[in-house]
Amino acid sequence: MKRVTLEEVARVAGVSRATASRVVNGASSVDESLRHAVQRAISSTGYLPNIAARSLVTRRADAIGLLLPDERRMDGDPHLASVVSGVTRVVRPLGVHLVLMMTGPGTRERALSDLRCGRLDGVILVHTDPADPVPGQLIAAGLPVVLAGRPLEPMPITYVDVDQTAGAALAARRLKSSRCTRIATITGPQDTPAGQDRLAGFLAEVPDAVVVHGDFTRQSGVAAMEELLRCCPDVDGVFIASDLMANGAIPVLHRSGRKVPDDVAVVGFDDSSAALTSEPELTTVRQPITDMAAEMARQLLRQITEPRSPTMSVIFEPSLVVRDSG
Amino acid sequence: MKRVTLEEVARVAGVSRATASRVVNGASSVDESLRHAVQRAISSTGYLPNIAARSLVTRRADAIGLLLPDERRMDGDPHLASVVSGVTRVVRPLGVHLVLMMTGPGTRERALSDLRCGRLDGVILVHTDPADPVPGQLIAAGLPVVLAGRPLEPMPITYVDVDQTAGAALAARRLKSSRCTRIATITGPQDTPAGQDRLAGFLAEVPDAVVVHGDFTRQSGVAAMEELLRCCPDVDGVFIASDLMANGAIPVLHRSGRKVPDDVAVVGFDDSSAALTSEPELTTVRQPITDMAAEMARQLLRQITEPRSPTMSVIFEPSLVVRDSG
DNA sequence: GAAGAGCGTGAGAGCGCTCTCCCAATCCTG
DNA sequence: CAGGATTGGGAGAGCGCTCTCACGCTCTTC
C-alpha cells in the first residue's frame, strides 16, 4: 500500500507533472483529451493530493480554527453544535478543515502561533474575554479573525452578532401587549456586550422596569428570581436575558405559588434547548445561530482570500418564538 | 513581515540546519553551548517551525478528526462540549489538532480520504450508524480509528464505552431500594447498543418491569410516559433510559396529578444538562464523558504511534447521581 | 601507542507539490 | 505569406523541513 504521487499520475497519463497538477486544480487551458487521460489516471491509481506538500508551496493550510471558552463556561451552552454546524456547512465544500480549540492555559497563544506558522489560515473567536490580549494581537498582525459577538470595546475587527437591543425590545413589546402592568427584567452580566444591550433594549421600551442582575447562569436565575419576588411581589411579567436563567427562575415562581404565564408571564432569550426543557415551554427571542456561524465562516474566508479587505460587522435580526410561558 | 526559517535560525546561531532542527525537536546529543545558541536564535528571530514542511517529511499531520452526527441528531445532545473538552485535554499538549466534521453528504468519505492523503492521522467516530460502511473501510485499510460506544455488530475495532448494563442495574437497584413496587422502564431505541444494554441491564434486576419503548428524544419521552400511564396507572417507579426523555416525561406525570418522587420515582441516564433543567432535578446514571473522550484520544494516539497495536475496548464504570427525582 | 568505539556535527538528499518560466505550435492580421 | 500574438505543455526550481550518512573528534582498551 504505497502512496500515489502526482508524478505517477503524470506517468500513467503520459503527460508532465505540471499538466497533471493543472487538471487536479481545475486550471483552465488543458486540452480536453489530455484532461481526460489525466482524470482516468487519477481514478485508476486512486490518487489523492498530499495536502502537506501543497500547503508548503501555496502557504495555505486550508484550515480555520474555532476558539471556544472552556467546558465550564460552555456548560449547558446549547450553541456549540449549532455553531459547528453552521461553520461546517460553509467550509466543508471548500475542503477547509475546522479545528476546535478550547480555552485553557496557553491555548490562545498556541492559536496565535498556529496562525503565524501557517497551520491555520484564520480563526473565529467565541465568547472572548474582554481582557484577552489575543484578539488585539491578531489584528495587529493583520491575521484573519472574526468575532462571534460585538467586542466590548470598539475595535477594528470583523464580527457577527444578532441585534441584541432589538431582541430585547421584541421581548418587551410582547410583555406589554400581554396584560402585564408590573414588568421586571433579570439581566445578564453587565460587563458583556450581550448583557448590556439586552438590558438597554428592554429599558428603552419599559423605562420603569424593575431590574435585577444575573450572570446568564441557571444558578443566578434562581437567585435573581428569589430576590425579585422579595422586592417586587406584584410582578406580572419578566424578561429574563437568557433561557438558562429562565429555566432556573420558573421553578422559583412555581414554588411561590404563582402560575406561568397566568400570574407571571416570562420571556427568555436565546431559544436554546433550555427553552424546551422548561415547563411551560419558554417564549423566547431567537438568534439564528447556525446562519450566524455560517456568516462568520464566510467573512473569515473572505479575509483569507482578500487579505486587505475591510473589517465589517454583520448584524442579524432576532425573532420572537412564542410558546407557552408568556 | 517575512517568514523565519530554520535556515535563518541556524545562520544566526552559527550552526548547521541539522543541528538547529535537532534542538527544535528536542533531540538528544546536542552540545549544551550550541543548544543555547540555537535557543537564543529561535527566540530572537521569533522562529516557528512550518508544519506543512515538517508534515511533508514526517508523514504525520499531527491532527485527528472527530466525526459527529449532524446537527439534528446532535440536537440537545449535551455531550459535544464534554467530548471536545476531553479530547482536547489529551491532544493539545502534544500539539495535535482536533478537526471537527459533522456528518453530511460525503463527509465520511471525505474523512476517509483525509486519512489516506495524510491530512489526518486518525479519527474518532461518534454515534456511528450501524449501516455505515466507513468504519469497516477504515479498519480494512488499517487506519487508526476509535469508536465512541460499542459497535452494534462485533468487529475488530477499538472502542470506549461506559458499562451500560451496570448503569441500568444501578438505576434498577435504586428504584427497588426505594419503596417502589410497580416498576417500569422507558427504553432507548432497540437498534442501538446503548438502547439494548440499558434495557437488558434493567430487566436483569427487575424481570417483571413494564417496558415502553422510546428513542432517546424528548418527544418520545412524552409519548412513552403517556402510554405508560394509560397501560399501567399504578406505576410508582420508572427508569428512563435518557435524561432527555425523562425531561419530557416528568411534566406528563405532573399533569396527571402525580408527584415526583412521592408518587412516582424517576431515574434517568446520562447526567446531561437535561438532568439539571428538570424539575425536580433528576437522579440519574452518570457516564464520565470527558474522561471517556480523553481515553479515546489516548487510544487513538497509541494506534497512530504503534500502527500494529492490538484493538481493544475500554469500559468505564457508571455511577449513580442521587438528586430529587428518585 | 595504535586500533576500535562512541559521539556530536554538517552536508545534502529528498518529501510531493505548485508555479514560473520558456519553447513550440497554432492562430490571426495586414 | 511573413510577422506577431496567443495558447498549451514541459522542464525545473524551489517551498521548509527531517533524517541518513559520513566525517572528525575524543575517549577507551589491550
Image (cartoon, coloured by chain):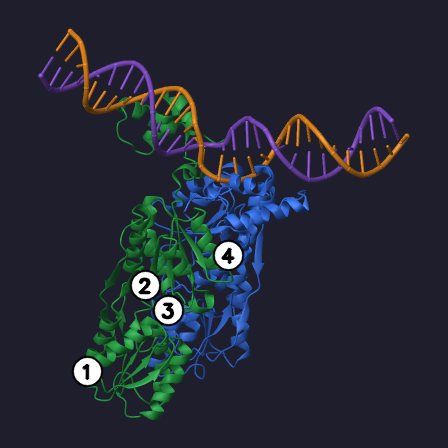
Chain colours: A green, B blue, C purple, D orange
Name the residue located 41 percent from the left edge and 49 percent from the top edge: A120
Tell me the SS state at disc 4.
helix
Quarter of the image where one finds residue A282: bottom left
Label 4–label 3 contact, CB within 8 A: no
Of the residues shown, which amino acid type is indicated by label 2?
Answer: Met
Label 2–label 3 contact, CB within 8 A: no
Label whose residue precedes the other's in the sequence (4 or 3) = 4
Q: Chain of mark 3?
A: B
Can residue B278 be seen? no
**Which residue is nearer to you in this view: C10 or A109?**
C10
In whole angstroms, how far apart are the C-alphas of marks 1 and 4?
A: 47 Å
Q: Which dot marks residue B221? A: 3
Residue B198 relative to residue A153: left or right:
right
Tell me the SS state at disc 1.
helix
Q: How many marks?
A: 4
Q: Which dot marks residue B285? A: none
In whole angstroms, how far apart are the C-alphas of marks 1 and 2?
A: 36 Å
Q: Which residue is mark 2?
A: A155
Of the residues shown, which amino acid type is indicated by label 4?
Answer: Val
